[in-house]
């Protein structure tokens, strides 16, 4: 239904109770652009509207960026679901504009430039409501103009174009952002979430679970490999996950046959790069290599919780006597101190390349703790189950694996990263409105 008032055009469907009112104003170049002037309230069954005026200057930079509606925020829950577009419309995504603007800009063809925030929100909407193809997204927005406006799409007078982009435009937008841009956007969202939590007196990434999960690829994907253990042809996600707030922090996307252990330290390095310093990390025994143990305790001073085998035994090269003997071999080296503490000795050996020996020392500590208090160590390790539940949620609820329609490692990673960006966007929107419970819950949209 379209309702026209003097200098105001409002579009709505028969069940919407909120829509935005826009006034077309000339910019400095003489082009007509929409300026938000108020909100229109129309109850179901009524034929008249009332526009509540609200002054807002019409600012037109390189793009006409979307504005955040000023009506009351409703936190969606399973008992009170809301439209995903209405929720995203209340999110401020200005933190990622530098990345979007550097990737999505005018080319020599001078094509129509859509609001990049609205474009990204549309990509997120597609993941949240389970639209498999961009053609599905195009049809959905064409049939729900009110939701398209909530995302930030506005029809510009003077342009021979419709209200929303077509499927090829969405595809082009995703490709122009590319894998590097997607990574930057995800990092920015994680950092922004951490900043919001810090303002509330909390800290992101204190306790982190690390795990991998296989993702089935397309049947004819040349980069997808077959793994006999998983009995799957595809890829692997190596992820780091905040177990306290339920927030995915980082992940690496590899071929399915690559090992887990070499991915632990790069993930922790990534967290450190974003200003996240975990206090404890939870991972299965595949990550408990001697090299990882040495780096965890020497470089990060981090307590780790691994699942140890029942027949785990101490390593002879990591006993106190063996460590002292190895240290004395460097008696002619600079920095050697016969009165050094065990901590100083381990740091010295790390600096001289004796990583395996240092790892063996810490391995022996884990074996003793496992045998001395099995129940306590097992209980601590079980916090790792949070990331397994998260991976299951991504596959079963958000259909991450079912909707894998990209071929090639890079395209498949973009597909996965968009799901992560969608979850992070939901969490950030809640934090922007003071909500800290169920940050990444997405089973609440209709």
Image: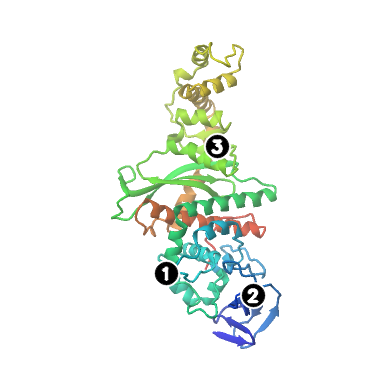
Decide: is 233 above or below 17: above
Q: Which residue is mark 2?
A: 36
* Front tag of 1 and 3: 1
**Rendered-image quadrant of the N terminus:** bottom right
Q: Residue at x 67, y 48 (%)?
A: 198
Q: What's the distance in space between the residues labelled 3 and 2, CA to CA?
A: 53 Å
x, y percent for residue 62? 57, 66
Q: Residues within 10 Å of mark 2 (few under 14, many from 20)?
A: many
Given contact means CB atoms under 8 Å apart, are the residues at marks 3 and 2 in contact? no
| Label 1 neighbour load within 10 Å: few <14, some 14-19, many 20+ | some
Percent position (x, y) of residue 162? 48, 78
Give the vertical position of 37 relative to 412 (above or below): below
Which residue is denoted by mark 1 in the rendering?
Answer: 167
x, y percent for residue 109: 44, 69
Secondary structure beneath dot 2 equals strand
Looking at the picture, how far across and down is residue 378, in whole percent? 51, 35
Which is nearer the N-term, disc 2 or disc 1?
Answer: 2
Q: Is residue 405 left or right of residue 86?
A: left
How far, Cα to Cα, is label 2 from label 1? 27 Å
Read off the residue under disc 3.
380
Q: Measuring 62% from the left and 63% from the top, which residue is drawn there?
A: 75
Q: Is residue 61 above or below residue 287?
A: below
Name the secondary structure under disc 3.
helix
| In this rendering, position of residue 17 left or right of residue 285 | right
Foreground of the two, 396 or 327: 327
Q: Residues within 10 Å of mark 3 (few under 14, many from 20)?
A: some
| Residue 62: image tag | none
**Element assignment for label 1:** helix
The residue lying at 62 percent from left, 82 percent from top is 43
> Which badge, 1 or 3, comes first in the chain's sequence?
1
Visible in this render: residue 194? yes
Q: Nearer the viewer, mark 3 or mark 2?
A: 2
């Amino acid at each position: 239904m379209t309702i026209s008032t003097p200098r105001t055009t409002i579009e709505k469907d028969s069940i919407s109770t909120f829509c935005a009112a826009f006034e077309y104003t000339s910019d400095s170049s003489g082009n007509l652009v929409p300026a938000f002037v108020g909100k229109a309230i129309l109850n179901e069954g009524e034929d008249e509207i009332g526009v509540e005026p609200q002054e807002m200057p019409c600012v037109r930079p390189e793009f006409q960026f979307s504005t955040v509606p000023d009506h009351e925020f409703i936190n969606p829950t399973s008992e009170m679901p809301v439209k995903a577009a209405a929720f995203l419309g209340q999110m401020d995504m200005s933190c990622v504009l530098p990345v979007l603007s550097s990737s999505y800009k005018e080319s020599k063809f001078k094509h129509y430039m859509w609001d990049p925030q609205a474009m990204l929100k549309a990509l997120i909407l597609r993941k949240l409501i389970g639209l498999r193809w961009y053609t599905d997204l195009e049809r959905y927005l064409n049939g729900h103009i009110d939701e398209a406006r909530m995302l930030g799409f506005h029809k510009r007078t003077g342009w021979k174009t419709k209200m929303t982009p077509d499927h090829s435009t969405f595809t082009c937008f995703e490709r122009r952002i590319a894998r590097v841009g997607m990574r930057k956007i995800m990092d920015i969202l994680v950092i922004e979430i951490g900043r919001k939590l810090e303002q509330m007196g909390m800290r992101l990434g204190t306790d982190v679970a690390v795990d991998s999960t296989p993702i089935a690829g397309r049947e004819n994907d040349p980069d997808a490999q077959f793994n006999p253990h998983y009995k799957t042809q595809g890829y692997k996600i190596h992820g780091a996950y905040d177990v306290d707030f339920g927030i995915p922090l980082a992940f690496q996307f590899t071929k399915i046959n690559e090992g887990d252990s070499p991915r632990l330290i790069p993930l922790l390095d990534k967290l450190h790069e974003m200003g996240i310093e975990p206090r404890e990390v939870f991972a299965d025994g595949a990550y408990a290599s001697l090299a990882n143990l040495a780096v965890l305790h020497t470089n990060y001073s981090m307590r780790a919780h691994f699942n140890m085998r029942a027949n785990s035994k101490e390593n002879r090269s990591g006993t106190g006597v063996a460590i002292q003997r190895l240290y004395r071999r460097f008696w002619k080296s600079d920095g050697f101190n016969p009165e050094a503490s065990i901590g100083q000795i381990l740091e010295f050996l790390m600096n001289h390349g004796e990583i395996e020996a240092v790892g063996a020392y810490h391995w022996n500590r884990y074996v003793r703790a496992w045998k001395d208090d099995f129940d306590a160590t097992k209980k601590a390790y079980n916090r790792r189950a949070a990331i397994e539940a998260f991976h299951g949620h991504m596959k079963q609820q958000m259909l991450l694996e079912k909707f894998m329609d990209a071929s090639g490692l890079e395209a498949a990673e973009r597909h996965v990263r968009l799901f992560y960006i969608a979850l992070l966007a939901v969490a950030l929107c809640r934090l922007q409105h003071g909500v800290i419970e169920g940050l990444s819950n997405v089973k609440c949209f209709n």
